[in-house]
Amino acid sequence: MEVPHFNVHKTKHTTTHDGTVSLVRLIQSDPSCMAKIATMNYAWLDKDGELKPHLHPDSVEYFFFLQGLGSIQIGDVTLGVESGDFVTVPMNTLHTLKNSQEEQLIFLTLRAIVQQQEE
């Protein structure tokens, strides 16, 4: 399984609004599906904290890591995560997150319910 992920600090940025704003696009629209935001959270795991393995049968989940170090397992893929990492968890895929550091692992999550468009 390929898990879409990248670090915003290590990715080339673009500019918008007549060059006044620099950005790294995190989510690009996909014309084959529509989604509606179910939740957006500011979250953290304390030292040795672990997010219980779970899945979302109707939605994609995006993680953006703000602080700390940890690991995320998505299906059979395990990735190290750090500040600036953006990870996409595909719909209906088992995933868990762990913090093994002293400091908190702080992150944002956005879960989007996917509605496939008919062709």
Image (tube, rainbow, N blue to C red):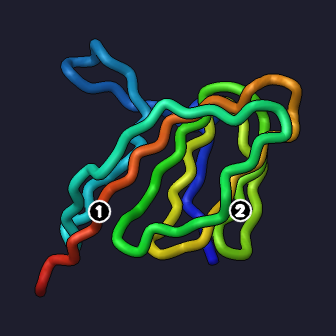
The picture places residue 21, in percent across and down from the top left corner, at: 32, 18
Along the viewing direction, whichever of 98 and 84 lies nearer the viewer: 98
Secondary structure of the residue carrying tag 1 is: strand
| The C terminus - image quarter | bottom left
Q: In this view, does 27 lie above or below 65?
A: below
| Residue 82 place in picture, x, y as percent | 72, 36
Q: Mark 1 or mark 2: name the one nearer the start of the chain.
A: 2
Tell me where residue 24 appears, x and y as whole percent. 43, 34
Q: Quadrant of residue 74?
A: bottom right
Amino acid type of the residue that numbered disc 1 sits on in the rendered structure: Ile
Relative placement, left or right, of 10 versus 81 is: left
Graded by Cα atoms within 10 Å as few (under 14), some (14 to 19) or many (20 or more), the crowding at tag 2 reads some
The residue depicted at 49 percent of the width and 30 percent of the height is: 42
Residue at 73% of width from left, 69% of height from top? 77
- The residue tagged 1 is 113
Name the side, left or right, on which 82 lies relative to 66: right
Label for residue 29?
none
Q: Residue 79's quadrant in the figure?
A: bottom right
In the depicted structure, whether residue 79 falls above or below residue 11 = below
Which residue position holds label 2? Answer: 73
Cα distance between the residues tagged 1 and 2: 21 Å
